[in-house]
Amino acid sequence: MDAILTALADPARWRLVGLLAERPRPVGVLAQLAEARQPQTTKHLQALERAGVVTSQRSGQRRVYALRAAPLRELAAALTRLADTAEQAGGPRETYDRYGLSLHAERLAAREPGWADGRSFRFHRSLAAGPEQVWRHLTEASLLARWWTPDDLRVSELVFEARQGGRILHEYRDAEDVDGSDLIAGRALGVVEDVRPGERLAYRLSPQLADGSLAFTAHLDLDLRPTDTGTELDVHFRITDSTVESADFIAGVEIGFGQSLDKLAAILAAETHTPHTRSTE
């Protein structure tokens, strides 16, 4: 595949491929139609033949070249698979495009400090686990780190002190940045404000800009309500102290935090449906 792509990357060779798609042609005629010198045309045809794109045979004094369709069909199929993967419904590219639209709108709206103050988002999830188990995933750092980022990110550093006045530090990187060599995707500092185990958790969290200043402050209220099948979780996400530079962060709140909660729901569902092993004597 690499050899084919390299061979077709040259515009002169691509022109020859187009001419050969119409019918097999000798070198001299190809040179005339391509308005090129014959020696150079021969070199291009030889490169295409080495890549398997064309074949040739001698006919009297002439060498006639013909296009091989199979390699082109294989290339076309590979490109189609790539395109289908990129456009998969609900996939990463769809999320990327949604964020792009939101980003454009928020940047236009961010005219002056305080532009997004009072903006709020509400989230609701029905979780397949009791309040005690949900609470642990909301407050214990080792469990919180498993879900507290959007799909394409991972937690790289986390402090969550689940007590009133407790400190929060949340740093995250690209999910594929396993050695930490890339720039961090984000970092936020916060404080826990209200702790009622199994019932309510409230904290404020401020993402940092590149210069270390705060982009905005998010006030999060998480309420848990037990049900016969698990727990109803309601989240109120409210913004204050918004800076002009906070637009990029605010544009991703609904998508990103929603993905995080979806991960939490999936983790709890898997834990709930995993059968417990019983020891035998």
Image (cartoon, rainbow, N blue to C red):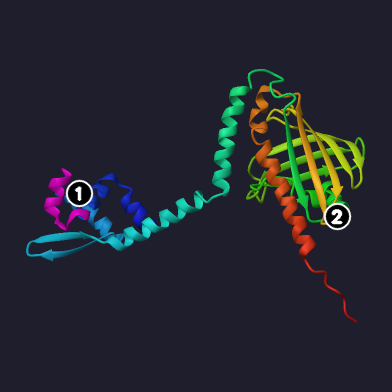
* Prevailing secondary structure of the magenta residues: helix
Residue found at x 66% / y 51%: 178
**What's the CA distance linking mark 2 and mark 1?**
75 Å
At which x and y percent is residue 257? 71, 41
Lateral position of residue 87 relative to residue 227, left or right: left
Numbered mark located on residue 173 in the image: none
Crowding around mark 1 (Cα neighbors within 10 Å: few <14, some 14 to 19, many 20+) is: few
- For the residues bearing labels 2 and 1, Cβ distance under 8 angstroms: no
Which residue in the rendered view is the most extreme toward the left? 60
Camera-side residue: 127 or 266? 127
Quadrant (top left, top right, bottom left, bottom right) of the C terminus: bottom right
At which x and y percent is residue 137? 82, 51
Lateral position of residue 272 relative to residue 29, left or right: right
Residue range corresponding to the magenta coloring: 21-36
Residue found at x 73% / y 23%: 117
Residue at which label 2 appears: 130
Dividing the picture into quarters, in which one does residue 240 lie?
top right
**Dot 1 lies on which element?**
helix
Lateral position of residue 106 relative to residue 31, left or right: right
Residue at which label 1 appears: 40
At which x and y percent is residue 113? 70, 19
* 267 falls in the magenta region: no
Is residue 226 placed above or below 170 in the rendered structure? below
Q: Amino acid at mark 2?
A: Gly
Residue found at x 74% / y 41%: 123
Camera-side residue: 44 or 34? 34
Lateral position of residue 100 relative to residue 254, left or right: left
**Circle nearer the N terminus (2, 1):** 1
Residue found at x 74% / y 52%: 265
Crowding around mark 2 (Cα neighbors within 10 Å: few <14, some 14 to 19, many 20+) is: many
Q: Amino acid at mark 1?
A: Gln
Of tags 2 and 1, the one toward the viewer is 2
